[in-house]
Image: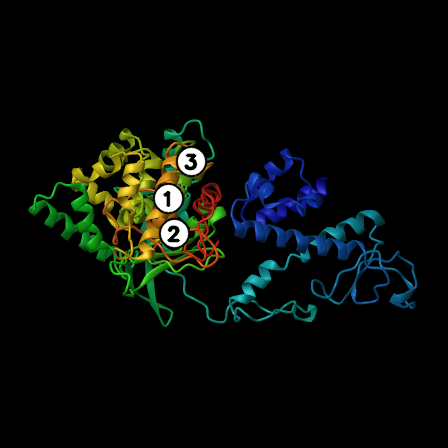
């Protein structure tokens, strides 16, 4: 168990997670058991991201293979390190003696003999010493990483013992920058190249966090901030021919643009005395969001333009969304969302559903039950808030009034609120709310519950021309749909709600703050095989297959069961 603990400690240290060893010990997980842990079990032990879990499994597999090589090499006649009792004949071949300990040629010199007649160690002690030295020599991952800096990413690396003295340093040596910058928190000077790493774990900021969170000793700090600015903005040296020539600020390439846009917007809205938060939002959206239009306004036309494409898992929405959003360097272009294994093209519908799903998950995990150990996630949450507000998603109305006031008005907010402030200000919304207090009312307005009257007024039927047989069938079907909506409103349709019907049709459970680009409606295509409803969320159209003389309407309960099946489905594609 002690050796297992050592191996696990080495693996976790290599992956940058040494503090998790205590979790393995508490759960009595040894090295052998670690190879059988599921994703859920690894997550409970603290290995939360997909990438970390994959790297952990690869490391365990690699160490298992190495240990198997050390303990089970019958009949090995290859080169290695051998320990022989003193006085054994050196004339006999390697094949006539089973080696007490050996190593493959990838880790050690091809031949090495170890004398045992030193008078200070027993044979068993010498074997154990050699075993420890051999195990350490097999940790070649660091050498491989260093070599890969000199090679193409697709190259394969072969380690040969004859090359043990070969230098693995890059041939293109970079001069160490002599420029230093002062940390804004601890006021100590650091080399430019070391400052970014220092800001992630600055002791002074960590102490500030612990003061605000006295009951949480292990708060993980991803970034710090001062006066709304991300303190991870650092100064880097531009080198030309390996000679320092200039110093520039390495900020988000679009930060200067968004600062100018926000200043222009605030000035205009103040001069025009715009106080309606909806009008403020509409103007901000027109100036901040770039690329492809957010909504279709004409179903007969196509839209083009730049987008931020993200691929997320509906069943793991939180983790996959955080990874995707954190990878975006410019949040201004329209977000284009695709769910795993769903082929829908996002022209507005999937994006609106994505915002609804992710905000619901954020509320459940980070606000209903706070998770202070994930403090750095709150900046990403702030970015998602800003994107949802500006791109016709849901408004995060679950913030408490005191939290909203602290978010926009406090000079020394709680660390969690500070991180959210940093996130929403990536798109300038903190500065807007600070300068235009009426804008804050967007967060305070609680939505009215969707009713049958509201839903039927939103979903207008598009009947065929007056006097046609098709219109007669369509009206008959629409009367059944109204009856189904009434049963849904009264709670008699299993898990289907009125919001689920609107979500199925438009991609959102409520009418967006700025309204729909195309007003939702109900179409009545002729049914040739099935009466299951379909929808096109990008043009907000619900399709209810209508009966015909050849294909009459099924009994009411069967029809309603088909409606239940469709409206409880969350998949973009044919059901």
Place of residue 83 in the rendered image (x, y in percent of width and height, measured from the top left): 83, 57
Place of residue 42 in the rendered image (x, y in percent of width and height, measured from the top left): 59, 43
From the viewer's perspective, tell me whether residue 472 is left or right of residue 268.
Answer: right
Q: Is residue 510 above or below residue 108?
A: above
Contact (CB < 8 A) between labels 2 and 1?
yes
Residue matched to label 2: 544
Rendering quarter of residue 301: bottom left
Residue 350 seen from this side? yes
Q: Which mark is residue 481?
A: 1
Q: Which mark is residue 364?
A: 3
Question: Mark 2 to mark 1: distance in Å?
Answer: 9 Å
Indicate which disc, 1 or 3, sits on the residue closer to the N terminus.
3
Rendering quarter of residue 252: bottom left
Question: Depth check: 470 or 32 in front?
Answer: 470
Q: Secondary structure at mark 2?
A: loop
Rendering quarter of residue 490: top left
């Amino acid at each position: 168990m002690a050796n297992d603990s050592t191996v696990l400690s080495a693996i976790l240290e290599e992956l940058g997670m040494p503090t998790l060893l205590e979790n393995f010990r508490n759960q009595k997980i040894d090295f052998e058991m670690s190879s059988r842990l599921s994703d859920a079990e690894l997550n409970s032990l603290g290995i939360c991201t997909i990438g970390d879990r994959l790297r952990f499994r690869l490391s365990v597999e690699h160490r298992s293979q190495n240990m198997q090589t050390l303990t089970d090499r019958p009949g090995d006649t290859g080169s290695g390190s051998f320990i022989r009792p003193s006085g054994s004949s050196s004339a006999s071949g390697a094949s006539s003696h089973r080696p007490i300990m050996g190593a493959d040629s990838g880790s050690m010199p091809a031949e090495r003999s170890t004398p045992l007649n030193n008078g200070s160690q027993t044979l068993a002690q010498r074997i154990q010493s050699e075993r420890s030295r051999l195990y350490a020599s097999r940790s070649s991952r660091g050498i491989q990483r260093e070599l890969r800096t000199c090679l193409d990413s697709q190259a394969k690396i072969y380690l040969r013992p004859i090359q043990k003295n070969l230098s693995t340093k890059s041939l293109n040596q970079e001069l160490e920058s002599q420029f230093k910058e002062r940390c804004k928190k601890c006021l100590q000077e650091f080399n430019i190249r070391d400052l970014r790493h220092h800001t992630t774990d600055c002791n002074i900021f960590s102490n500030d966090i612990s003061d605000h969170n006295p009951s949480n000793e292990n708060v993980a700090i991803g970034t710090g901030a001062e006066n709304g600015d991300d303190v991870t903005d650092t100064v880097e040296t531009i080198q030309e021919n390996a000679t320092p020539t200039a110093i520039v600020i390495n900020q988000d390439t679009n930060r200067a643009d968004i600062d100018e846009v926000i200043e222009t917007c605030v000035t205009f809205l103040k001069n025009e005395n715009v106080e309606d938060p909806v009008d403020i939002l509409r103007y901000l959206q027109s100036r901040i969001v770039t690329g492809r239009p957010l909504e279709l306004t004409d179903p007969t036309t196509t839209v083009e333009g730049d987008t931020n494409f993200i691929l997320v898992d509906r069943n793991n929405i939180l983790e996959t969304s955080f990874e995707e959003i954190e990878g975006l360097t410019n949040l201004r272009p329209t977000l284009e969302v695709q769910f795993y294994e769903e082929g829908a093209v996002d022209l507005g519908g999937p994006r609106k559903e994505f915002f609804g799903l992710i905000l619901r998950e954020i509320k459940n995990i980070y606000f209903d039950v706070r998770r202070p150990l994930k403090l750095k996630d709150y900046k990403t949450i702030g970015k998602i808030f800003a994107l949802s507000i500006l791109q016709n998603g849901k408004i995060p109305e679950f913030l408490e009034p005191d939290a909203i006031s602290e978010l926009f008005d406090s000079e020394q907010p709680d660390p969690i609120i500070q991180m959210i402030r940093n996130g929403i200000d990536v798109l300038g919304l903190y500065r807007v709310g600070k300068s235009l207090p009426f804008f804050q009312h967007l967060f305070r307005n609680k939505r009215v519950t969707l009713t049958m009257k509201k839903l039927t007024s939103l979903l207008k039927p598009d009947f065929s021309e007056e006097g046609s047989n098709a219109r007669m069938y369509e009206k008959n079907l629409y009367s059944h749909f109204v009856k189904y909506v009434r049963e849904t409103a009264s709670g008699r349709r299993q898990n289907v709600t009125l919001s689920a019907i609107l979500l199925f049709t438009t991609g959102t459970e409520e009418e967006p703050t700025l309204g729909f680009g195309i007003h939702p409606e109900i179409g009545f295509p002729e049914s040739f095989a099935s009466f299951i409803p379909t929808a096109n969320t990008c043009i907000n159209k619900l399709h209810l297959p209508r009966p015909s003389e050849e294909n009459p309407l099924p009994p009411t309960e069967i029809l309603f069961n088909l409606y239940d099946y469709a409206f409880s489905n969350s998949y973009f594609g044919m059901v």
